[in-house]
Amino acid sequence: MQALLLDQQDGKTLASVKAVEETMLPQAEVTVDIDWSSLNYKDALAITGKGKIIREFPMVPGIDFAGVVRDSADARFTPGQQVLLTGWGVGENHWGGLAETARVKGDWLVPLPEGLTGRQAMIIGTAGFTAMLCVMALEDAAVRPESGEVLVTGASGGVGSTAVALLHHLGYEVVAVSGRESTHDYLKSLGASRILGRDEFAESRPLEKQLWAGAVDTVGDKVLAKVLAQTNYGGCVAACGLAGGFALPTTVMPFILRNVRLQGVDSVMTPAPRRLEAWQRLVRDLPASFYQQSATEITLDQAPNFAEAIINNRAQGRTLVKIR
Ligand code: NDP
């Protein structure tokens, strides 16, 4: 099989597409022939070696994939069945989706939801799935379209783009935060009503004028601190990312004086029922136009270059990898 293989030499990560014996695949119940994978921020950290994502080499990266079951020792899955996978440490500590074949646990697989192709599933990918979980977190916190404007940070990235499109489709007034002028037309086409510059979020006071009923934050650090200081009484911020850093220079003021909820969102270990619900919601709530607007399709050979682009904030929307 062809695979993107990561190795380490003198502390540096080397990434190259190679022919690999399938006997090297890890032991697990279900073998999947992969059609589509994608590049997420975490994949970019792993492939470029910019983040300590991978501890054991050689490793096949790719934290998500869609494909067809070849054989299965798990009665829930049958040969020919279409499946998708996101998370569970696949592509981090278990060989992942940037290869023609993967062998994984049945518990990690989701049957491809009706109404979705494998290609669409990977245009959504881990990033889009996480955006849906963030939107569901806002709904759980009773943030409704009539509650007021909602903010999305890191808006032109994979999670951000999907969050903007979903929230707009659900009737929310969406304000996008982006560090790039070049993405403004794109963000408007996804449904952002206005766009704020990232530089406006550099400094904040413990409490500022209340502006947002809710927010999806993919950036962390100072940006998240400012978002919290500007969140309305009783509002909720769904925090899922660290594209701007993992620190959080904030105070308790938004929590104790404004009843603000900071809701963490993790997609890796999401339990199966919530997973299935999120995928059903994506089929229903993500507009068909999103798949054209937000996807850049690449080949496996191009993955290392595009991983660099993601790390250097030169990518927009979702990067889809055609495997076969
Ligand atoms: P992308 O690279 O596609 O998007 C990240 C966006 O963040 C960029 O497009 C950019 O948006 C903004 N950004 C980039 N660099 C900086 C910076 N230095 N400071 C501030 N903003 C920056 O990544 P994804 O959308 O795939 O992931 C976003 C974040 O969410 C990542 O940190 C990722 O690890 C995390 N994540 C977490 C998951 C979870 O389970 N909790 C699952 C998936 C992702 P713009 O140019 O518009 O400003």
Image (spheres, rainbow, N blue to C red):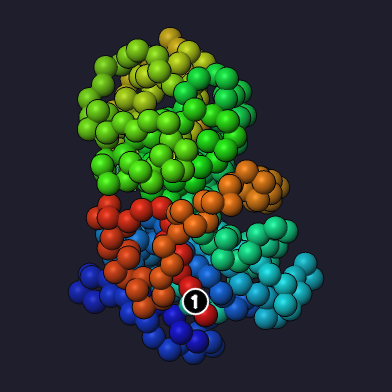
Circle 1 Cα neighbour tier, 10 Å, few/some/many (<14 / 14–19 / ≥20): many
Image location (x, y in percent) of residue 141: 59, 25
Image location (x, y in percent) of residue 36: 53, 70
Q: Residue furthest right?
A: 75
Image side of residue 99 versus residue 305, left or right: right
Residue where numbered disc 1 is placed: 323
On screen, residue 278 above or below 199: below
* Identity of the residue drawn at 49% across and 27% down: 173
- Please tell me how many numbered marks the rendered image carries: 1
Image location (x, y in percent) of residue 294: 45, 54
Is residue 246 visible to the viewer in this orientation of the structure? no
Image side of residue 235 versus residue 224, left or right: right
The residue carrying mark 1 has its beta carbon less than 8 Å from ligand 1: no
The residue lying toward the viewer, choosing from 73 and 285, is: 285
On screen, residue 85 above or below 67: above
Image location (x, y in percent) of residue 104: 60, 71
On screen, residue 109 above or below 256: below
Is residue 127 visible to the viewer in this orientation of the structure? yes
Q: Element at badge 1?
A: loop
The residue lying toward the viewer, choosing from 139 and 290, is: 290
* Identity of the residue drawn at 49% across and 46% down: 162
* Identity of the residue drawn at 42% across and 31% down: 193
Name the amino acid type tagged 1.
Ile
